[in-house]
């Protein structure tokens, strides 16, 4: 049942300047790209997808011939879609330039078709509109599923039957969540593969598109000073931290069905862990990298309940302002025990990482917004200076921090002599702060990922065996938390989270950075 007509077929013809020619013989026929944003009326489309497409257009990354269609049930004209998306397009790439002209030209390439998600007929109509724009060129089609997961399969069925490209490629970007557990994720993959091949499915994890996450492999594999230390002999623990200083505002209903472990840990943090801990890939080819990520995920044991702490934020008043509890959200069911915070310790059973705790912490409504990878190194054996300067120096081990956001930076904490005639030591940073070093605007993760999908680069997308391995690690503990209805520890909105997270770290001889 896979997509018919996805490969070039001999009996098809295209219009060219020199008349009709068989597509297979028409090397000179230019291609055209049609991007359809399914769920174009929604939050993600407005907030991220259209702005990312505009940024790509602005910087001339999109092919010369392209058109963008929005598709959703809401009734809208082309002009109304343009008005809607123009509100979130910005000239962020060059603030000094008035990009109004370019924005207008971009908007003229955006169109809208209203239809149902499970109507082959409506997708057939979309196909007709796409064909009108594609005439004379070889069409490549990219569908972005920016819709709730319960309608992914309907859309893929209708789009693949009625709106896939006949002569070019068809690719589908799928947004998370990819199921709720190993079983539902496997089921989703099985259903998608009834209509698409694995190569056509681009499962997005936008954390893989973040600049610092992309840089992780460069840092490791192209600097002699890091890779030799990247193992249990020198690294004491690794911390993967995600925190937001706001709650589930507006998304409580969606969130309650998933919780923070599924929302952040099983995907974003675990993907970073896999990139961090994988062996050197044979090449930079997407398949080689994904093979190494799968290997490392499969070397891990499922997370144990005793290695997990869960929390949920409660209401809090500060400076005359009051902040709501998670349970105050009217879309959250009464008595919900869904965690908005979790900390977990994970272990990799291989020669490189045996015994090294990988600690994850993710939470909403905490005191700060940050995403970081912290690597704490072991003590200097027989440290000369700790004899004279006390054992505190033993605690002050080197720490490498990759700050993914905000204010991207890589810094290494070192022990250093305070300048002067005496001998006093302190902790200093060797600091690579991106905004001081690079005078360019860092692209949004969605820009990189959209461009990769257009170019057929799969390195930053999740392959189905990776997804299976990721769910295998978290499904048992998620089931246990839910079956035992384990109550989360309450923590005040805007705090550092539950104290249980500190005990968990202490059990593994770790202090959170
Ligand atoms: P929305 O809830 O805004 O839904 C997108 C569109 O889908 C809506 O505009 C609506 O369009 C249609 N829709 C909504 N609910 C239903 C329903 N029950 N049945 C059929 N159609 C429906 O989602 P988002 O834009 O927030 O997110 C899209 C996808 O991206 C989701 O899978 C989400 O999990 C994921 N995601 C979102 C993020 C975000 O920041 N928003 C971040 C990361 C992932 P219409 O009524 O016009 O058909
Ligand atoms: C999404 C989660 O995947 O990532 C959200 O569903 C979270 O809950 C978001 O807020 C965070 O992304 P970013 O890029 O703002 O850190």
Image: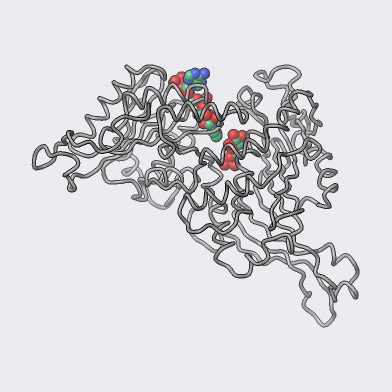
Count how many numbered circles sit on residues in the image.
Answer: 0
Q: Measured from the top left, where is residue 332 in percent x and y?
A: 68, 20
93 relative to 227, above or below = above
Q: Nearer the viewer, residue 61 or 219?
A: 219
- In the displayed structure, does residue 193 sit left or right of residue 333? left
User: Which image quarter holds the N terminus?
Assistant: top left
Residue 429 position in % (x across, y down): 70, 65
> How far across and down, in percent of the image, does residue 141 sit?
33, 35
Q: Is residue 475 above or below residue 466?
A: above
Q: In the image, ligand 2 is in what quadrant?
A: top right
Furthest-bottom residue in this view: 421
Q: Nearer the viewer, residue 411 or 138?
A: 138
The image quadrant that residue 197 belongs to is: top left
Camera-side residue: 100 or 236?
Answer: 236
235 sits left or right of 382 in the view: left
Residue 447 relative to residue 111: left or right: right
Specify the color scheme: one colour
| Quarter holding residue 50 | top left
Which residue is farthest left?
18
Residue 447: image location, x then y, percent: 45, 45
Residue visible at 30% across and 21% down in the picture: 124
| Residue 295 versus residue 481 in the image, above or below | below
Q: Quadrant of residue 14?
A: top left
């Amino acid at each position: 049942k896979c997509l018919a007509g996805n490969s070039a077929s001999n009996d098809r013809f295209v219009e060219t300047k020199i008349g009709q020619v068989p597509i297979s013989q028409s090397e000179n026929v230019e291609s055209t790209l049609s991007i359809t944003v399914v769920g174009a009326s929604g939050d993600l489309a407005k907030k991220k997808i259209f702005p990312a497409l505009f940024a790509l257009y602005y910087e001339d990354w999109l092919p010369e011939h392209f058109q963008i269609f929005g598709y959703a049930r809401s009734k809208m004209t082309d002009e109304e879609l343009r008005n809607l998306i123009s509100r979130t397009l910005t000239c962020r790439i060059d603030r000094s330039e008035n990009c109004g002209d370019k924005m207008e030209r971009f908007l003229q390439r955006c169109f809208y078709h209203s239809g149902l998600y499970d109507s082959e007929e409506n997708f057939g109509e979309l196909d007709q509109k796409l064909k009108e724009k594609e005439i004379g060129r070889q069409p490549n089609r990219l569908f972005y599923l920016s819709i709730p997961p319960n309608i992914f399969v309907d859309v893929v069925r209708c789009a693949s039957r009625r709106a896939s490209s006949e002569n070019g490629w068809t690719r589908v970007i799928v947004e998370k969540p990819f199921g709720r557990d190993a079983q539902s994720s496997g089921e989703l993959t099985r259903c998608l593969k009834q209509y698409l091949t694995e190569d056509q499915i681009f499962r997005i994890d936008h954390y893989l598109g973040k600049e610092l996450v992309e840089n992780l492999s460069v840092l490791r594999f192209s600097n002699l000073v890091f890779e030799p230390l990247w193992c249990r002999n020198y690294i004491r623990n690794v911390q993967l931290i995600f925190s937001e200083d706001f709650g589930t505002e507006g998304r409580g209903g969606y969130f309650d069905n998933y919780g923070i472990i599924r929302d952040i840990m099983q995907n974003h943090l675990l993907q970073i862990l896999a990139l961090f801990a994988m062996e050197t890939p044979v090449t930079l080819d997407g398949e080689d990298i994904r093979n190494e990520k799968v290997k490392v995920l499969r070397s891990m044991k499922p997370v144990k309940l005793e290695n997990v702490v869960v929390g949920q934020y409660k209401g809090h008043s500060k400076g005359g302002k009051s902040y709501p509890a998670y349970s105050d959200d009217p879309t959250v069911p009464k008595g919900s025990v869904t965690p908005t915070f979790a900390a977990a310790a994970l272990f990799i059973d291989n020669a490189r990482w045996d015994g090294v705790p990988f600690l994850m912490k993710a939470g909403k409504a905490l005191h700060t917004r940050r995403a970081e990878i912290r690597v704490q190194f072991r003590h200097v054996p027989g440290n000369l200076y700790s004899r004279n300067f006390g054992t505190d120096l033993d605690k002050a081990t080197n720490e490498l921090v990759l700050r993914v956001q905000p204010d991207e930076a890589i810094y290494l904490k070192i022990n250093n002599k305070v300048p002067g005639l005496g001998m006093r030591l302190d902790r200093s940073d060797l600091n690579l702060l991106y905004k001081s070093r690079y005078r360019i605007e860092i692209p949004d993760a969605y820009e990189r990922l959209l461009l990769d999908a257009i170019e057929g680069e799969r390195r930053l997308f999740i392959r189905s065996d990776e997804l299976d391995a990721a769910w295998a690690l978290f499904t048992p503990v998620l089931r246990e938390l839910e079956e035992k209805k384990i109550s989360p520890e309450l923590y005040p909105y805007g705090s550092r989270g539950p104290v249980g997270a500190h005990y968990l770290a202490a059990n593994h001889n770790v202090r959170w950075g």
